[in-house]
Image: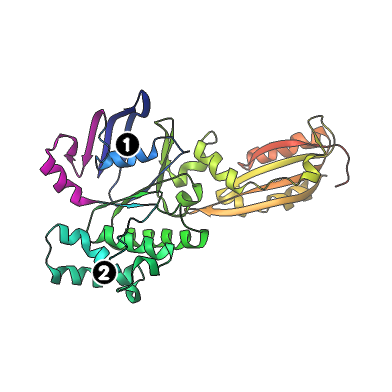
Amino acid sequence: MIELIGLNKSFAAIDALRDINLFIQEGEIFGIIGKSGAGKSTLLRSINLLERPDNGDVIIDNQNISQLNPAGLRHARHKMAMIFQQFNLLSAKTVYDNIALPMRIQGIGEDVIKEKIDELLPVVELANKRDAYPAQLSGGQKQRVAIARALSCSPKILLCDEATSALDPETTDSILALLKKINQLYGITIVLITHEMDVVKRICHRLAVMEKGKITECMPLSDVFNHHESQARSMLYARLSPELPVCLSNRLTQTPTNTPILRLFFQGETATLPFISQTSRELPIDINILLANIDRFDSITCGVLVVELFADSLLLAEFMERCEKANLTVEILGYVTDSVI
């Protein structure tokens, strides 16, 4: 569906894109994540050539749009639509007229426009806002209008440029659920960029990590936990990992004692096994669970435990060995200077 081959783009001697090679399958939700300045927006805008790369090819639906003349490119862009962080609605026009605008620009008849809008308004849950103006809408409702407008010309590809960044968490959840519904209902390929791993983990099938203009990782979300050195895995666990209270962190030392503090990362089947209770029964070791967090990413259950052990070095080594056999990743955070917490 979307194939990017050898894309490079520079601005004033700064490399925004560096040898980008990427294939996005038809019908998938693909997330591109990275920090500000990583090149995400430039990459997204290169897909529809709003930002033309210095070199490389952009192939959409088996057509190299990089080689099209202006008229051909305008026609090819009918397959693609874009939604933005700031909605970009016309304040003097109603919800109906904002959605109708792209169709009117293409010369589509009013009967067809009405039929399409009557179809879209219930999908985006705005059937009762047909004649409202943007000033009368919440931020989430404005984004729903923008999504309906993007869908009005029946695109095959929807490009989302930080589409939830201006929204509160609850509204973000509802917009992500809407995008997932649209993907399932119409089979539209969705490409979204974000700096929030929460957005990626909620709806994406695959993700790419960008850093300094390069794609450093690209994989299905379900495979992230199988790559222990993965940046995406670190991002997912960083969001999950509970922070130690100051009263405890201030008492940690790197000098070994009989009270180590460990952080355990687990995923998949190990997340549902009674590892802690079994280990405490089978080994002469006391395990105190201090902090815990659990979540689901795609179909994978994962989580983080912070535990305090009462164990000498030999018992600690045996515990670590059991963790390795159970496919748990373990990190020693330090040792408590005394045995009372």
Residue 14 forms part of the magenta stretch? no
- Magenta-drawn segment: 54-80
Indicate the quadrant containing the N terminus: top left, top right, bottom left or bottom right. top left
- Is residue 153 among what the camera can see? no
Q: Residue at x 32, y 74 (%)?
A: 127
Extreme residue toward the front, this view: 92
- C-alpha gap between disc 1 and disc 2: 37 Å
- Is residue 148 among what the camera can see? yes
* 91 shown above or below 253: below
Q: Residue at x 39, y 39 (%)?
A: 40
Type of the residue with mark 1: Leu
Q: What residue is disc 2 on?
A: 96
How many discs appear?
2
Q: What residue is disc 1 on?
A: 22
Please tell me which residue lies in front, 135 or 241: 135
Q: Residue at x 32, y 36 (%)?
A: 22
